[in-house]
Structure formats: C-alpha cells, structure tokens
Image: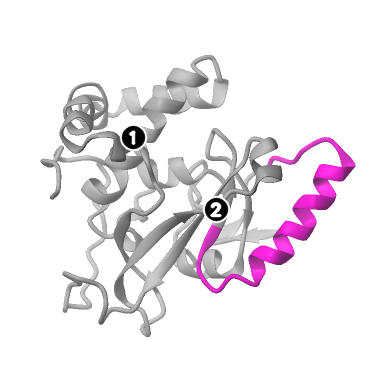
Amino acid sequence: MEYQAGGQRSRPRPAPESLRAQAYLQDYAAFLEAVPFPSVVFDHRWDVVLTNDAFETLFRGVGPHPTAMPGDNFLRFVLFHPDAGTILAEHESSWCLPMLAHFAAAIERHGQDPVLRSILREIAQDPIMDAAYRHGLPHWIRSVGPEALEHDGAVRPLWHPDPRWGRTDCRIVGETPKTLKGMGYTRMTLVLRDARRSTGAARTTARVRRATSHLSVVPAAEA
C-alpha cells in the first residue's frame, strides 16, 4: 500500500527477494483485505510488511512521526509515538509493558540486529522508560509469568475512531501460516469485541491524550 495511517510512509516496507515470495505476499495481502478486523504482518524487528484497511482505519487519526508510525514499525509506535495512548487504552500497563517484554526476548535472539539496537538506544535515552525496561520489566515478567511473552489470546483495551466501536476491547489473535513464518514474518489481528461483551469497558467516551514522556509507572501485574 502506498499510504499508511497518519500520512505517507517514511520508508519502503521490507520485502523478500524471491519472486515466489513476493507473489505469495501479494496474494496474502488480498486475503488480509477480506479480514474485517485490524490485521498486520511484521518481521522480527516489528517492521511492518502488510496491513489491511481495517488496520489503517484504526490508526487514521494518528499524527505524523519520523520513526514511529504504526504502519512503519509497530513496536516503535507503541513505545514512542505521543498519540499511541489515544488509540491503545491503558497504554502503559496493557500495551507498553507487554511490548517491552517481547522486545527483550527479541534482543536475546537477535542482539546484533542494527534496528533492534537502535530501538534499545532510544529506550536508554528516556530515563523513565529505561528504568522500566531494566528494572521494572524483569519484576513484571516474574509476576505475570510466561504469558507475558505471548501476544496470542491477550485481551487489551483500545479506543476506535469509529463511534460504533468507541472504547472497546480487542483480543489479539496470532495466525501465522507456515509459509509466512518461513519468511520470518508474524501476523497479528486485533479482533474487536462488541462493547457490550467487553468486561470492564469504560462508559465514558472521553479520550485523554498521552503526555510527551512515555512510561510514568511500572504497574503491578494484573489479575
């Protein structure tokens, strides 16, 4: 796709070299468009390979950012975009900490990857996020357990720009077919849940913009 949520892409999407793999991705993109829920395919760096229209609709109100657009690198968006909290509700506890846990695991596997190293440097430049990553995150992982490193099945809150959804929850579903996994890619779909089924959904429609600084606290593990 030529455009992403919030404006034109700042850099090309990563793509496989082989023509066969490229053809597969073209067909997979068509398949992705048939999915009614926001769905994204990314590599081990969280560089985005494919998104569908529902994904772009979810993030259409996000302002421009040089490195942290949701259609460029989803991890950078969650951690560094000042608008992330306007879409990803309970941003710190429900989204930042789980993504930091996944990032820590990726650093262990791909410690010399230059993109991951650059993200690590950005984390280190933010004193609050650095403290959360180096000190708070290990405690959180011990408290939450192995599920801290698993996206699939997690239920997380968000704000959808379509008032028919509004403040709701989504269940994260990881569906990565063998061919896609063989290319080093992962697919993640945010299955939106009807607000009437979303336990604990907020009744208010007020939306609070996230402050410029990132993590302000490292919350206790949720039940």
Front residue of 91/152: it is 152
The answer to whether residue 65 shows anywhere in this view is yes
**Residue 138 magenta-drawn?**
no
Q: How is the image coloured?
A: one colour
Dot 1 alpha-carbon crowd within 10 angstroms: few under 14, some 14 to 19, many 20 or more: many
In this picture, residue 98 sits left or right of residue 24: left
Reading the image, the residue beneath label 1 is: 100
* Numbered disc 1: secondary structure: helix
Q: Amino acid at mark 2?
A: Glu
Gap between marks 1 and 2, in whole Å? 21 Å
**Residue at screen point 44% across, 22% down:** 107
**Residue at screen point 43% across, 47% down:** 77
Rendered position, 80 above or below 7: above
Dot 2 alpha-carbon crowd within 10 angstroms: few under 14, some 14 to 19, many 20 or more: some
* Numbered disc 2: secondary structure: loop
Please give the label number shown on residue 175: 2
Total number of numbered discs in the rendering? 2
Q: Amino acid at mark 1?
A: Leu
| Region of the chain picked out in magenta, as a range | 13-39
Rendered position, 72 above or below 35: above
